[in-house]
Amino acid sequence: MKKMFISRFGILNMKTFLFFSSIVLVAKIGYSLIMGFPGGTFEDWNIAKNLAEHGAYAEFTEVGPTAYKLPAYSFFLSVYIYIFGEFGKEAAVIAQHILFFMVPLQIINIFRIFNKTNAGILAGYFFIFSPVYFYYSNVLEITNIFIPLFLLWIRQFVIIYRSTEASRKNIILLGIITGVLFLTQVIVVPLVLVLIFALVYQKKLRFSGFVLLFGLASVLYSPWIIRNYVVFDKVILTKTPFWQNIYLSFIPPVNVCDNIKLISSKHDHYTFQLKKSVNEFEMEKIYKSKVVEVLRGKEEIFVLKAIQNAGILWYVPARYFYDKPTAMFGRKIFVILLNILTLFP
């Protein structure tokens, strides 16, 4: 009886959740307006500006076209720059606030498919009251569209998985979302492929459905590969950075252990300035040269870094590792609590 009352009239009631979620959304927009939209930008923003203002997919127009980032987020941002001009950043941030407002609703919808609506609402509360959720959609960074898009993909996947046989409509939707998702974050590709093959293995997806799904995803993704081949005269399936990613994994801001900070902040600043005048293919050679130099005879450092990263994953990112005590509750305790809860069904 008590459980029924809580579910219908208390915090686990959907209307109550929407009330709190709406308040948080208004508070987030108000914070952005009052603080002057404080979030930073990354390479995607420069690419989006050049795309909207010059029709060039380039981070630096003087360097030339780029394949440094997958195109989905830059195209997303460019729409707001094109429509709102000098207020493009503000419009994009508000759009991200709204997208993040939809995230807990997607979580609830996924749980609802398993008849676990209350668990979904509880998960939604954890999300909307997270300090990270409150602030991060101010930052113009790809995670802000990746999370909503990935949850949309998960929901569509679960619908098919829970069905006796996948309908053509659901296969088409999953194929479209898959193509867009692949254009957003390459890191998700292996997981998505495993899950799709699981649908085939579990006989939730026939071979014809599998062909339709991948056909649609390929139609959406292939223009990126074709564009890269036409522009750079080489096959680039995803994006160009490889050695840069390894290089950046050894700079001070992303590490806690001093003996893993193999690349100095000074050299990092040097390469950051250099890429404004040197194309990414030449930069890859520079990154590779430096990585090979600092790792020579120190191959065991990868083991230490793996241990460090495992600890950071279950604690907080390196940048927050030495926060003042006043930040303990907002960042560390909240993250640790969430991590502990994930250990229990």
Image (spheres, rainbow, N blue to C red):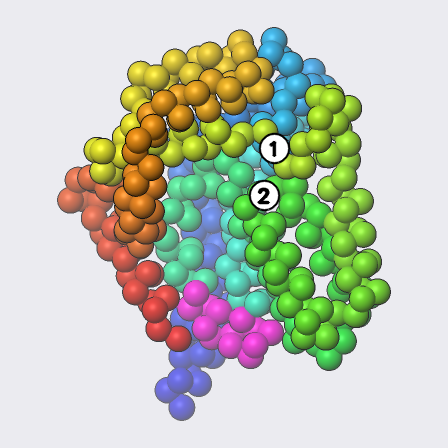
- Crowding at mark 2 (Cα within 10 Å: few <14, some 14-19, many 20+): some
Residue type marked 2: Val
Quick one: SS at disc 2? helix
The residue pinned by badge 1 equals: 239
- Closer to the camera in the image, 318 or 331: 318
Q: Is residue 312 above or below residue 245?
A: below
Which residue is outermost to the front? 297
Q: Which residues are magenta?
A: 111-123
For the C terminus, give its image quadrant.
bottom left
Quick one: SS at disc 1? loop
Residue 193, image x, y percentages:
64, 57
Q: What residue is at 45 percent from the left and 37 percent from the top?
A: 138
Q: What residue is at 67 percent from the left and 64 percent from the top?
A: 197
Proximity of marks 2 and 1: CB atoms separated by less than 8 Å = yes
In the figure, is residue 130 to the left or right of 209?
left
Q: What residue is at 54 percent from the left and 30 percent from the top?
A: 241
Residue 296 appears in which quarter of the rendering?
top left
Residue type marked 1: Lys
Residue 73 appears in which quarter of the rendering?
top right
The residue pinned by badge 2 equals: 186
Q: CA distance from mark 2 to mark 1?
A: 8 Å
